[in-house]
Amino acid sequence: MSAVQTSAPAADEGAHAPAPGAQSIAGDAASPDAIRRLSRTLAGGRSVKSQKKVLELLKASLAAIRLNDFEGGADRALAALRIDETSGLAWHVLAICQEKANRFGPAIHAYEAALQLLPDHSDIAHDLGRLAQRLGYLEISEKLLLKFLAANPGHIEAINNLACVMRDQRRYMDAVEVLRPMLEIEPESAVLWNTLGTVLNDEGRLDEALTFFEEALRLDPEFAKARYNRANVRRPLGDVPGAIEDMETALLGADGPYEAAMMRMARALMLMGEARLPEGFEAYEIRFDPNLPESMRVAVPAPRWEPGEQDIRGKRLLVVGEQGIADELVFANCLNDIIEAVGPEGQVFIAVEARMVGLFQRSFPAAIVGGHKAVRLEGRLTRYIPFIEDLPEGEGPDYWMPMASLMTVYRPSVGSFPQHRGYIRPDPERVAHWKRELDALGPEKKVGLHWKSLVMTGARSAFFASSFQLWEPILRAPGCLMVNLQCGDVADDLAAAEAAGVRIWTPPINLKDDLEDVAALSAACDLVIGPGIAGTNIAAACGARTWMVVAPDDWHLMKTDRYVFYPDTRIFVRGAVNGWPGVIGDIRAALDEAVATGWNAA
C-alpha cells in the first residue's frame, strides 16, 4: 500500500456542502494503553549489548511519545534502526511517531516493515488498519482489521472499526450486521452505539441516528465523538442552538489534533450557515490544518498574501482554486473584487480545474487563467500550478491566496454579496448552437436534469443523490422535455426511463469533461434542475435559470431563503428525513405552475 506519490485529480465536488463525515474509529496507536503494551514488550527484550542499546533507545522513544514529542520519538527510533534495521519493534515505534506527526506516507511504510518483521504482532495490523481507513484505503484497511480479529476475536475496538470501514464503503447492512451481535454482548458500549448512529446518519436516517447518539451519550456523557455526531444531526433536524452547543462542548473533549481539526471544520460550516460572518470564514481556514488528511498544500514559490499586512495594489497575485468544481464556482464570487483591488498596474493569476480554464478566462479577461494539478506526496494532497512555473523569471506572482480565503476580505456580511445574473460567461456561439439543437427537438420547454453527484462517499449519498425512479413525476411534466445533463454512467437510468415511455434527450458530448459545452447547453435550456453539485453550480454561475435542491442545513443559504452566491437561483429545501419524495413533488408542482402561466412562474 504505497502512498508516496499517486495521481489525485480534482473531484467534481470537494467538500462542497455536507459537514465532515461522522467519525467513530476507535483506538489510538499512541494511547497510554498502547504505549504500556509496547513498554512491556520491550521489558522482555534480549540483553545482548547491541540489543540493549536498541531497547534503551526505544524506551526513550516511548517516553517522548508520552510527552507528545513525536519528533524526538522518531529520532530515537531511527537511531535504534541504524543499530538494527531488522527490529520490528523499532519500525512499529517509528510508525507511531510518523503517524502522530502527520507524515502519513512514511508512517505507512514503517507499519508495513513492522508487520513484515513481526507478522504475529496483530496490534500492528490494527494500527495500520486504522491509518489506512483514515487515508481512504478502505479495502486494505478491511483486510488488516480482519487479520487482527482473527487473532483477537471479539475485540470491541476492531469490530467497531471494521463496521466503520464497511460504512465508508456504503455497505450499510454489512456494518449493522457486524455491530448487532457485539451490541447484544456489550450493550453498555458507548463506542458501538455511536458507530451504529454514524451508519444510519450516512444512510440519511437522521432521526434514528440521533437516538443512538443520545444512547451513547447516556452511557458516556463525556464521549466527544458522540456529541460531535449528535451536533451534525441536530442542525439539519432543526435544533440549531443545540447543535452549536454540542459542537462547542465536543471540542473541549477532542481526542487529539486530528479529531479537534475535524470538529473545528464542522463548526466553521455551522458558523457560515448561521451567517456569523466574517467569523465563519475565518474559522474555515481550518481546512489547511495538516492534521486533516485532505488538507491541501500549495506548491508556489511565493508567500501567501496577508490582507492586513500587505497592500495588494499594483501587485501580482495568484488565486488558487480549492476542492472541487462546485467550490471553485462558488468562491469565484470574489474574483472581480480582487481584480479591482489589484488594479490595472498589477496582475491577477487564477488557477482552476483545467476543464474550466476557458470559462474563467472569458469571464475574467483582465486575469491570466491556467489549470492547476494535484498529486499525493506521502499521503498528502499537494496542488501545483504548471502555468506559473512556466513564466519567465520576475513575471511570477508576488503573493498567492486560496480562493475561498477571499471571502473573509470581501464578504464580511450577507449584505455584501452582490446581486447578479451570473459571473461565468459561456461561449455565446456554443449557446446559440445549442439553442438551435434544442429548438429542433420540438416546442416543449427544455429542462436540463441532474440527479446525483459523481462523488458518493459517506453522507454525500444521502445529501446529493436520489433514486432516479423518484424523479418520474418531473420526467412526465406536461409541456417539458427533459435534457440529460447528468455526467457519469447513467445508461441504466436512461434505459429504465425509455422503457417507461419517458423521453429524455442526451446531447452528443462528454458531460463530465466538456464543461464549455455543458455551460453553453445549460444556458440554452429553459431551466436546469438538480441537487447542489458541479452541474447545477455551472448553470447557476452562468446565469441560467436554475432550480437547486438543497439540504435544510446547507451553509450556502446563510439563514436566508436563497442561495446567497447565486441570488436568482430558486431553491427547494429537502426535508432532513426521507425528504426526496416531498421535494420532488414540490418541483413538479412548480413546473405545472410554470407551464400554466406561460413559464412566468419559473
Image: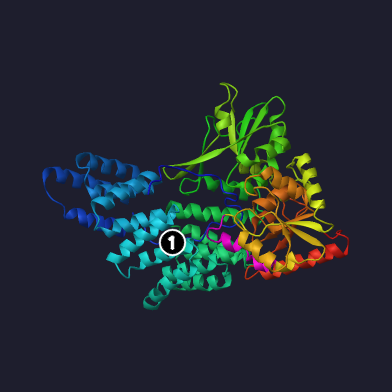
Task: Report the quarter where the C terminus lies.
Answer: bottom right
User: Is 464 one of the magenta-colored residues?
Assistant: yes
Which residue type does callout 1 highlight? Answer: Val
Q: Nearer the viewer, residue 386 or 295?
A: 386
Q: Name the element at disc 1.
A: helix
Q: Is residue 343 above or below residue 482?
A: above
Query: x and y percent of residue 439 in the render?
Result: 82, 52
Left/right of residue 76 with respect to residue 332 in the rendered view: left
Q: Quadrant of residue 133?
A: bottom left
Left/right of residue 568 with respect to residue 121 in the rendered view: right
User: Is 41 one of the magenta-colored residues?
Assistant: no
Range covered by the magenta-colored residues: 455-471
Left/right of residue 190 with respect to residue 598 in the rendered view: left
Query: x and y percent of residue 3 in the render?
Result: 41, 45
Toward the top, the furthest residue is: 393
Who's the residue at 83% across and 65% down the image?
Answer: 593
Whether residue 416 appears in this view of the structure is no
Who's the residue at 75% across and 40% down the image?
Answer: 427
Q: Is residue 350 above or below residue 295?
A: above
Q: Which residue is mark 1?
A: 165
- Crowding near pointer 1: few (<14 within 10 Å), some, many (20+)? many
Toward the left, the furthest residue is: 48
Q: Nearer the viewer, residue 272 or 549?
A: 549
